[in-house]
């Protein structure tokens, strides 16, 4: 027997504990090297724990839902044991002739092979459809199962052929309790949701939050976007969205009013000489705020590509801790969900945040005439302890002016 220990990877300095979600393998099952065994949820991100070597999972030390720390032992793999030996070791395993009549024979991957290992996006698709990765021949490198393989499998595998029991969700709800003829169910908050709640309460308790509003005519941005959209996408391989304009407008204003880009540390005000802009992104596990680092040095294409990358990672739970650490200012776009107005909460230790909302056609007065314009309400919440109303209002006006004359963003005017 040659045992290899499976341990929790290193967490960030600000994260002391994590929660095990659900084991993807059972004791006695064969595993391939680098195959994902379990996901670990911290208060910031979800990490994957891969198998350090091929073999048989002989012991699970910590079960689903356990609280763990960095470098903690959670399982052991026997690299010398064969899958066949492990299968015969089960007391409840069917006889060989029974196996032959109930399931087709499968060739298990050799130690070190990637056959039967699904890429993250593919693994999610297969888990949602309850399809066993071992039943799919991967076309990726070393036999890995790609997203295309998974989609093809879901289209060809009939529902009746899939396992009757779906995988357990990360946080299974407690069975509904009947209160008369009305049902209730109690679901524990995830570690990420708990941390979000703590930070929001911390922000409201420690910041003197005030919000200022303005409106912006989005027609110039829409015209410029329409004019260059096709060439932009062809040149850069990504669509030109609205968020890059908002990021550029924010950086434009922060350069003029550095206090909006500052933070408080004790009795000191820290003026940041860089512009790390957080972009709030919704994910299945809650709100996350990945950071566009040195946004002032990024072009429109760089911003759009990075935001698209963040969105995909957020959906798949693949955002790293380093991608969400820091930040000097944040943007929250409730408009994608149809929000018309909101008062965003500051993301500590930052001192201000911009709320962007849905663009709608509205009647407005221009030169004594009523005209229809695509208008967007902007809301900027700020910490009144260090930011006075003058700087907050003028900063938001600077953003408005940049969006209503976007050509100035190209020339830094």
Image (tube, rainbow, N blue to C red):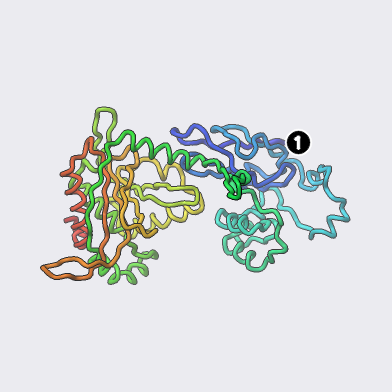
- Please report the residue visible at 71 percent of the width from the left and 51 percent of the height from the top: 110
Q: Closer to the camera, 230 or 406? A: 406
Q: Is residue 219 above or below residue 258?
A: below
Q: Residue 272: in sight, yes or no?
A: no
- Please report the residue visible at 44 percent of the width from the left and 33 percent of the height from the top: 13
As drawn, the residue found furthest toward the front would be 180
Q: Which residue is mark 1?
A: 1
Quarter occupied by residue 402: bottom left
At label 1, counting other C-alpha atoms closer than 10 Å, the crowd grade (few under 14, some 14-19, many 20 or more) is few
Q: Is residue 104 above or below residue 319?
A: below
Quarter occupied by residue 407: bottom left
Q: Residue 48: in sight, yes or no?
A: yes
Quadrant holding the N terminus: top right
Residue 211 falls left or right of residue 182: left
The x and y percentages for residue 77 are 69, 39
The x and y percentages for residue 104 are 79, 60
Q: Closer to the camera, 152 or 56? A: 152
Residue 82 falls left or right of residue 298: right
- Please report the residue visible at 30 percent of the width from the left and 42 percent of the height from the top: 328
Quadrant holding the C terminus: bottom left
Residue 29 falls left or right of residue 123: right
As drawn, the residue found furthest toward the top would be 267
The x and y percentages for residue 68 are 57, 33
Q: Total of numbered circles in the picture?
A: 1
Which structural element holds mark 1? loop
Quarter occupied by residue 229: bottom left
Q: Closer to the camera, 284 or 261? A: 284
């Amino acid at each position: 027997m040659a045992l290899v220990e499976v341990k929790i990877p290193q967490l960030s300095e600000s994260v002391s504990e994590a929660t095990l979600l659900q084991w993807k393998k059972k004791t006695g099952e064969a595993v391939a090297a680098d195959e994902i065994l379990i996901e670990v949820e911290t208060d910031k991100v979800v990490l994957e724990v891969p198998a350090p070597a091929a073999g048989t999972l002989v012991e699970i030390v910590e079960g689903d839902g356990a609280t763990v720390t960095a470098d903690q032992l959670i399982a052991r793999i026997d690299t010398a044991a064969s899958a066949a030996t492990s299968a015969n070791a089960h007391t409840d395993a069917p006889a060989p002739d029974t196996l032959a009549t109930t399931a087709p024979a499968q060739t298990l991957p050799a130690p070190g092979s990637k056959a039967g290992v699904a890429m993250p996006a593919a693994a999610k698709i297969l888990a949602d459809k309850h399809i066993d990765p071992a039943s799919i021949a991967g076309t990726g490198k070393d036999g890995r199962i790609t997203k295309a393989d998974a989609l093809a499998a879901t289209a060809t595998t009939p529902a009746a052929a899939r396992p009757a029991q779906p995988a357990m969700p990360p946080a299974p709800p407690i069975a509904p309790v009947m209160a008369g003829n009305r049902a209730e169910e109690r679901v524990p908050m995830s570690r990420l949701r708990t941390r979000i709640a703590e930070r929001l309460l911390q922000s409201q308790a420690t910041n003197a939050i005030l919000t200022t509003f303005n409106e912006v005519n989005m027609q110039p941005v829409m015209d410029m976007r329409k004019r260059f959209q096709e060439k932009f996408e062809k040149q850069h391989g990504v669509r030109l969205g609205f968020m890059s304009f908002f990021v550029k407008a924010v950086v434009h204003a922060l350069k003029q009013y550095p206090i909006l880009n500052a933070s408080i540390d004790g009795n000191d005000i820290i003026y940041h000489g860089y512009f790390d802009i957080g972009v709030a992104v919704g994910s299945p596990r809650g709100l996350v705020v990945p950071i566009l680092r040195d946004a002032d040095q990024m072009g429109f294409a760089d911003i759009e590509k990075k935001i698209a990358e963040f969105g995909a990672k957020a959906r798949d739970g693949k955002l790293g801790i380093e991608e969400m650490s820091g930040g000097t200012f944040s943007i929250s776009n409730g408009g994608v969900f149809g929000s018309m107005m909101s008062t965003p909460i500051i993301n500590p230790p930052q001192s201000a945040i911009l709320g962007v909302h849905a663009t709608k056609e509205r009647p407005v007065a221009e030169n004594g005439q009523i005209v229809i314009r695509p208008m967007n309400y902007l809301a900027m919440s700020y910490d009144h302890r260090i930011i006075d109303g003058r700087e907050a209002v003028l900063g938001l006006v600077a953003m408005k002016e940049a969006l209503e004359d976007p050509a100035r963003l190209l020339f830094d005017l």
